[in-house]
Amino acid sequence: YGSVHTLSGHPLDNIKAKLQLDPAYHGQSSLGAIRKMWGQGRARAFWRGCMPPLWGSAVYRSIMMSSYEGTFTWFEQHVAPDSFWRQEYCFKVVRPLVVASAVVCSLCRAVAEAPIEQAKVMGQTGRSWQVSSLYRGLLE
C-alpha cells in the first residue's frame, strides 16, 4: 500500500504542488501544467521529491501500527474490564480505549510525517530545506 500509493500518486501530487505553490504555474490548467513540466524536465519533473515520501510511507505506517497496538495493549493490560475505557457506547460501536489508541496513533504519525511531507514539498518546488524547518506547520 505505502510504496505503490506513493509511486502511483506522486506525479499527480507534483502537478498539484506546482499549480498551488509555483507562481509560474498560477492560472494554468492541469494539462497546461503537465505540458510545461514535461518541457522543463521530462519525466523527472513528475518524480521530483519522491524519495522522502517513499521512505516515509514505510516508516510512518509502521509507527502508526505499532503506536496503536502499543496503546491498545496498554489499556487491555492496565485498565479494569469494567472501567469506562473498556465499555461499549453508541449502540455498542464505540469503545473509548479504541478512540484513545487512535488519537495516540494520529499524534505519532503527525510527528513522523510532518518533516517528511515538508521535505517532499520543498523537493517538488525545487527549494532547499533545512532540518530546522521540517516541523513548520505542525508546532506553530
Image: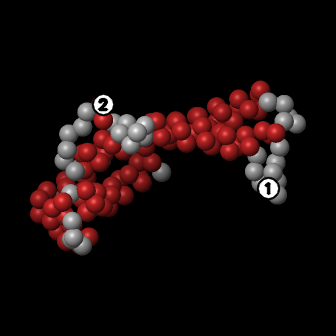
Q: Residue furthest left?
A: 39
Q: Quadrant of the C terminus?
A: top left
Q: Which percent across, then down, holds residue 111?
A: 46, 36
Identify which residue is drawn at 35% across, 53% down.
7
Q: Is residue 97 left or right of residue 40?
A: right
Q: Residue furthest front?
A: 140
Local packing at callout 2 (Cα closer than 10 Å; few below 14, some 14-19, many 20+) is few
Q: Is residue 81 in view? A: yes
Local packing at callout 1 (Cα closer than 10 Å; few below 14, some 14-19, many 20+) is few
Query: Which image quadrant is residue 37 in?
Result: bottom left
Above or below: residue 31 compared with residue 62: below
Give the CA distance from mark 2 to mark 1. Answer: 44 Å
Q: Which percent across, then down, holds residue 34?
A: 21, 67
Q: Amino acid at mark 2?
A: Ser
Q: Is residue 124 left or right of residue 76?
A: left
Residue located beneath label 1 in the image: 90
Q: Residue furthest right?
A: 82
Identify which residue is drawn at 26% across, 45% down.
122
Above or below: residue 32 compared with residue 100: below
Q: Amino acid at mark 1?
A: Cys
Q: Which percent across, then down, holds residue 20?
A: 28, 60
Determine which of the numbered discs, if any, sits on residue 132 in the image.
2
Name the secondary structure under disc 1.
Answer: loop
Q: Is residue 117 left or right of residue 123?
A: right
